[in-house]
Amino acid sequence: MIDKINFIDKSVLLKLNEWSVHLSLFVNKFFAEYLTYSIPIILLVVFYWEQKAKKPAMRAFFSAMLAWPILGNILGHLINRPRPFDAGGVKEIIFHRPTYSFPSDHAAALFAIAFSFWLSGYKKLSISLFIMATAISFFRISTAIHWPTDIIGGIIVGLFAAWLIDLFDRPLDIFYNLILKILRVIRLA
């Protein structure tokens, strides 16, 4: 079973990598790296958009923090899967340091934010974020930064993180209110 998954993983990656080689470096870097930097801006805009959006924006932020530096990091160190460009046979289009590949931290954080907004009732925003997360994830595969199953793992981690934050929403409400109170005192909310 694992051999079949690895075969599909490599086949998909090779086809996408072959396609991505023909794009400009800017296009590859924009979608695989730079577009990710718009997420904190989106979170800040949502946070300051209206009063009722502050807690959903904080939930989305904490979902991403649970998904990326906590759950993703733990899984990454346990599994320690090499990146596709380390495995050979693909063209490294953009430089990435050779850290663990599974799960995709970017996919975990991006999908955690999108799922979190979905669970908070912000359906239109979450659909836009799902599209953005999918585009970024696609290019992270095509540039040989991640295997397709790394992205799938990241999506699962993101969903789990958003679900956990949503599950513990009531106890975390005390924490959200404390943060909002501090931000109001220093005139940031």
Image (cartoon, grey):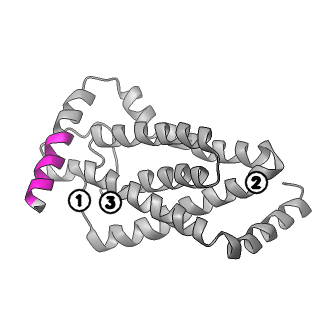
Of mark 3 and mark 1, the one earlier in the sequence is 1
> Which element carries disc 2, helix, strand or loop?
helix
Residue 176 falls left or right of residue 84: right
The answer to whether the residues at label 1 and label 2 have Cβ atoms under 8 Å apart is no
| Image quadrant containing the N terminus | bottom left
Give the prevailing secondary structure in the magenta stretch.
helix
Read off the residue under disc 2: 54
Residue density around tag 3, few if under 14, some if 14–19, many if 20 or more, within 10 Å: some
| Image quadrant containing the C terminus | bottom right
Residue 56 falls left or right of residue 9: right
Q: Which mark is residue 99?
A: 3
Distance of mark 2 from mark 3, alpha carbons? 34 Å
> Which image quadrant is residue 29 in?
top left
Which segment is the magenta one? 3-12
Given residues 157 and 100, the one toward you in this image is 157
Residue lying at 27% horizontally and 29% vertically, measured from the top left: 20
> Which image quadrant is residue 182 in?
bottom right
Residue lying at 49% horizontally and 50% vertically, measured from the top left: 110
Distance of mark 3 from mark 1, alpha carbons? 7 Å
Read off the residue under disc 1: 82
Residue density around tag 1, few if under 14, some if 14–19, many if 20 or more, within 10 Å: some
Please state which amino acid type lies under the numbered disc 3: Thr
> Which element carries disc 3, helix, strand or loop?
loop
